[in-house]
Amino acid sequence: MSQKKKAVVIGAGFAGLSAAAHLAKAGLDVTVIEKNEQAGGRARKFEQDGFTFDMGPSWYWMPEIFEAFYNHFGKKTSDFYTLKRLDPSYRIYFGENDAMDVPAGKKDLIALFEKHEKGSGAKLEKFLEEAAYKYEVGMREFVRKPGLSIFEFADIRLLKAALKLNMFNSVSSYIKRYFKNPKLIQLLEFPVLFLGAKPSKTPALYTMMNHADLNLGTWYPMGGMHEIAKAMHNIAMDQGVRFRFSEEVKRLEINENKISKIHSNKASYEADIVVGAADYQHVESKLLPAKYQSYSAKYWESRTLAPSCLLFYLGVDIKIPNLKHHNLFFDSDFEQHAEEIYDNPRWPEAPLFYVCAPSKTDPSVAPKAKENLFVLIPVATKIEEAKDTREKYYHMVMDRLEKLTKTEIRSKVVYKKSYAHREFISDYNSFKGNAYGLANTLSQTAILKPSVKSKKLKNLYYCGQLTVPGPGVPPALISGEIVAGLIIGKTKEQ
């Protein structure tokens, strides 16, 4: 290139970091503008009283996706952090004196299934074999498609694969073909909750997540999940990317159906290419004049969003003996909670919840003899929050946590911070305060997601959790790579 094209990426979450690094490596002049003070988006961290808290993602699945990203830039995972496989992968509490530890080893996993349902061990092997096939084909042929045209999927191989991948059945119905035990069904349905929809509404293709969970394993980057953001930030800077932190984009200036300038609260930037890696709906609806928006307000209102969540970050002045690194509390009615999230959105009566205790694995995240807890309650988006809501749910969850772990915890909490809809909106401009993006329902898959390419502006692209491939950390890396590939291809043509 005789003169480097200028690209501006709005947002330094995982998708934005991925897009920026790929674009810079291809020779573009890249600037990233981020409204928060550090890279990582929802995977930021904060420190308080000797505790280091990951603010968002806490599950490290699909390690090969991260490794491939690092390898592309001549690096490897171990250059940045030590990765540790968790065993057990996680614990599920079904009730008092009723907990299930999900082992990392295949032999122990089969034994666990046999214990709960005679004959299910052999069925599990077949189920996971099919999940591995879906993962291999899905990741290779479907997940990495930009979703711009139905013709991307017109290859006869892909049409045949779509049938074999059970694209048109639900996760729930598919799992129930194999297993009858309700605990095993809940164990296998759990991973799709990260995709933001009920198992009965999620295409059975996504049982490939069971391969990610049970075959590939659950890992932890020592130091915390923010180590991923730190690694990606360093890689991007090595490629020459410039970062502007604590700077918020306020307006996009249009000239001849192209964005010509990006105006922030601190400066203005010229650009040949713009990548919206911030919340898609916010970029569309708040930064662009109405005539240049690809999607109407009615369109956005009709989308099925993944849940939001109420989070508590807790520093505890004791070690809690009956917790693992990851803990799922399924001691209440899953169907009722799902109905309160998706079908009739409201604050739940008896929610399922999740507790991460990274200090079980990593002594660096809490002072000696103390525990670092991350408590997550999935809730519907766009629901009103009364003044006492957070305290009500804090005590509701702590009542159950103390009962099931048989440990007095509340009196030992030395640090407490909550986070919910209004913080997701203020920190990330999150549409309706969602935490995970757009749900991966069949009607919102591939070409049916908001497009990675603006329909109105020649040089505007999007990546992140509201477009392909969808919610999650590995998909975010892939989303940035997809959009960078489109831009690089277009640049080479020109």
Image (spheres, grey):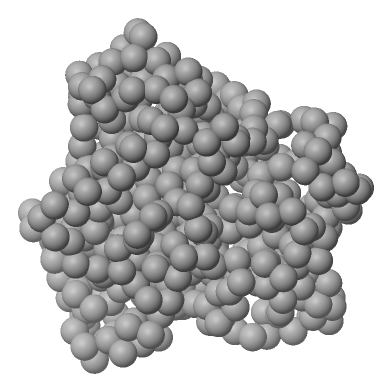
Q: Is residue 279 left or right of residue 105?
A: left
In the foreground, 88 or 54: 88
Please provide percent x and percent y for residue 208.
71, 57
Q: Is residue 275 left or right of residue 432?
A: right
In the foreground, 261 or 180: 180
Instruction: Inspect this view and state whether residue 306 appears.
Output: no
Q: Residue shown at 31%/45% (left/top)?
A: 396
Q: Residue 240 falls in which quadrant of the image?
A: top left
Q: Residue 279 falls in which quadrant of the image?
A: bottom left
Q: Is residue 414 left or right of residue 363?
A: left
Instruction: Inspect this view and state whether residue 417 appears.
Output: yes
Please provide percent x and percent y for residue 73.
55, 39
Q: Judge whether 127 appears above or below 107 on screen.
A: below
Please provide percent x and percent y for residue 77.
57, 30
In the foreground, 168 or 67: 168
User: Number of labelled discs?
Assistant: 0
Q: Return the residue found at the far left.
A: 266
Q: Residue shown at 26%/41% (left/top)?
A: 395
Q: Judge whether 65 appears above or below 283 on screen.
A: above
Q: Residue shown at 67%/67% (left/top)?
A: 172
Please provide percent x and percent y for residue 311.
30, 45
Q: Residue shown at 42%/19% (left/top)?
A: 320
